[in-house]
Image (tube, rainbow, N blue to C red):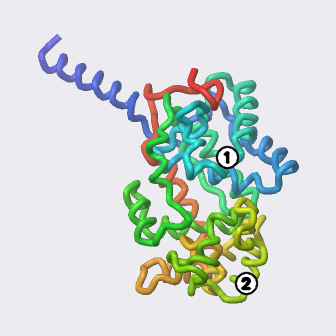
Amino acid sequence: MSCFQMATSLFLLAAMMLGGSNAQLSPTFYAKTCPNVSSIVRSVLQQAQQNDIWIFPKIVRLHFHDCFVNGCDASLLLNGTDSEQMAPPNLSTEGYAVIGDIKTALEKACPRVVSCADILALSAQVSVSLGGGPTWKVPLGRRDSLSAHREGTGGIPSAHDSLANIAARFKSVGLDSTDLVALSGVHTFGRAQCAAFTDRLYNFNNVSGKIDPTLNATYAKALQQRCPKGGDATSLIDLDEQTSLTFDNKYFLNLQNRRGLLQSDQELFSTNGAETVAIVNRFASSQSQFFASFGKAMIKMGNINPLTGSNGEIRLDCRKIN
């Protein structure tokens, strides 16, 4: 073999090895190994929704909280003393049992093939679609983390964060202002605990008795009745008071009317000079534009530091490593 041929062979071998550990995600990743993966996920979620009408927003939230901690690697699903689930941002997350049911169904149909990280990504897409929202082709091929990353949960955006802080968190993972507003629009369905917003009703900016001035006064009084001072902080309130079970663009109309439940939501529209204001207005006037931007943003979020190729593993049980 000539020196040129040897060099070429070594280059190709290196390229193959590099490709094996940094493979690109693809919507057709399971086309041959598990062609019915999407229909199986959809079937389990439809069944789950009969028992829990709020399961769709719960599942999307799991995917979001997973991706914002060291990437979309299903680390959130791991149990144990260092579990991300036990960190403050995740104490109210739910839907883990349904993800387990999907994994069980897929292991029966396609053993040792579909990762838990891909299950989260697919389940989020199907949940939005079944809730009346858009659909998009989910890039697949993620593998599962071998450990949790509890120390990284501080990077998950909070309902109490300022717009500047949230925008910085999104920018740090490659998401821009349009992605921020679009992904925030997931709050068009689901619920939030009183603890997530009562400071806006009674102690805004740590001033006793002060109500957030960006909150509609009538809406604030209604919320005070639902979440009385000193009451049950875990009581749940609809994020969208009109269509909380439907994925639509009403969320943005609520922001325009100063009826955003969470401070982090309302600041998208009520922060003077913020570039997010125009985006909120655009999505409020066009549901189709919101849907298109939401799908693109979900794909970008799903691409945050995925494990591919020979990295990580395909867990047999999403709650523990193999």
Classify 10 Å Cα crowding around label 1: few (below 14), some (14-19), many (20 and above).
many
271 and 49: which one is in front? Answer: 271
Q: In the picture, residue 27 is in which quadrant? A: top right
Amino acid type assigned to the residue bearing label 2 in the image: Lys
Q: Report helix, strand or loop for mark 2.
A: helix
Q: Return the x and y of residue 299 as percentages of the image width and height.
A: 52, 53
Q: Is 163 situated above or below 27? A: below
Residue plotted at (57% across, 85% down): 214
Reading the image, the residue beneath label 1 is 123
Which is closer to the viewer, label 2 or label 1? 2
Q: Report helix, strand or loop for mark 1.
A: helix
Pick the quarter of the image with the C terminus: top right
Say if residue 286 shows up in the picture.
no
Residue plotted at (57% across, 79% down): 208
231 and 225: which one is in front? Answer: 231
Amino acid type assigned to the residue bearing label 1 in the image: Ser
Total numbered badges shown on the rendered structure: 2
Spatial CA distance of label 2 from label 1 is 37 Å
Q: Is 275 situated above or below 104? A: below
123 relative position to 179: left or right: right
Reading the image, the residue beneath label 2 is 221
168 relative position to 302: left or right: left
Residue plotted at (57% across, 38% down): 117
108 and 270: which one is in front? Answer: 270
Q: Return the x and y of residue 76 as percentages of the image width and height.
A: 57, 40
Q: In the picture, residue 239 is in which quadrant? A: bottom right
